[in-house]
Image (cartoon, grey):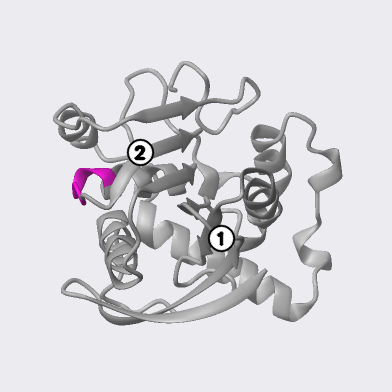
Amino acid sequence: MTSQTYLVTTADAGAVELAAAEFGSGQPFLLLRGGAGPQSVLPFGEQFADEHNVRVIVPTHPGFGGTTRPDRLATIGALAGLYDQLITDLDLEDVTVIGNSVGGWITAEIALLRSPRVSSIVLIDAVGLDVPGHPVADFFAMPMDEVFARTFHDPEPFRIDPAALPTAAQAVAAGNRAALATYAGATMSDPGLAVRLGTLEIPALVLWGESDRIADADYG
């Protein structure tokens, strides 16, 4: 793994420092994770790069992992624009964007920008849609124990007591939560997204976990 920091400038957000982990070389894949923080997809990114001989770029959404979020970078659409510009700045071609949870929502918004550099997308338990009768669970109103129970098929290996974390780790976790609330809002959905997605033509793979109770399989 290598660690990179890019300075990416967009009309929406201005100049943004963007930290990223990178694995492998070859066809580029942009891997966008959800609200669990940057560590949640790094093992998958490394494994995927090794098994398929590809380049996997795993950025940290600004505001997560102790990074800084500029005030102007405050929406999922703005994040999508940031990553679309990163793809252009790095002169990447034939990019597959893979997104989990909120990362899936960002992935959908990247696809809607219709960059010729993005050739396909993968949505894994993606939020963002407003599905009648199947709301995204209110993550911000839950105790962490319930979050783990709703997120993992077997939550026991992943449970932590936030109060037992070192002070610095508690601050990072609080920053992650605040950044997620800013980008995605309490409902983690956009009522207009489904209509806009209906205009999109791009190869897409949608994957869902049966045990997901943040956004259930019927939502998917």
How many numbered marks appear? 2
Q: Determine if residue 127 is in view.
A: no
Residue for badge 1: 25
Pick whichever, 145 or 30, lies toward us: 30
- Where residue 130 sits, quadrant-wise, is top left
Residue 39 lies, with reference to residue 10, above or below; the image says: above
Instruction: Please report contact status of discs 1 and 2: CB closer than 8 Å, yes or no.
Output: no
Report if residue 63 is visible in the image. Answer: yes
Q: Which mark is residue 186?
A: none
Closest to the camera, between mark 1 and mark 2, is 1
Quadrant in which residue 165 is drawn: bottom right
State the mark number for residue 120: 2
Q: Secondary structure at mark 1?
A: loop
Q: Nearer the viewer, residue 98 or 178?
A: 98
Separation (CA) of disc 1 from disc 2: 18 Å
Q: Amino acid at mark 2?
A: Ser
Q: Amino acid at mark 1?
A: Ser
- In percent of width and height, residue 38 lies at 60, 62
* Residue visible at 71% across and 41% down in the picture: 148
Q: Is residue 94 left or right of residue 190?
A: right
**101 displayed left or right of 89:** right
* Element assignment for label 2: strand
- Classified by dominant secondary structure, the portion drawn in magenta counts as loop
Q: Which residues are magenta?
A: 111-115
Residue shown at 46% from the left, 58% from the top: 180
Estimate the x, y position of residue 193 in percent, counting from the top left.
23, 36
10 Å neighbourhood of mark 1: few (<14), some, or many (≥20)? some
**In the image, what residue occupies the spot 43% across and 22% down?**
219
Residue 58 part of the magenta-drawn span: no
Q: Is residue 214 left or right of residue 91?
A: right
Residue 190 position, x and y percent, is 26, 40
Q: Nearer the viewer, residue 96 or 210?
A: 96
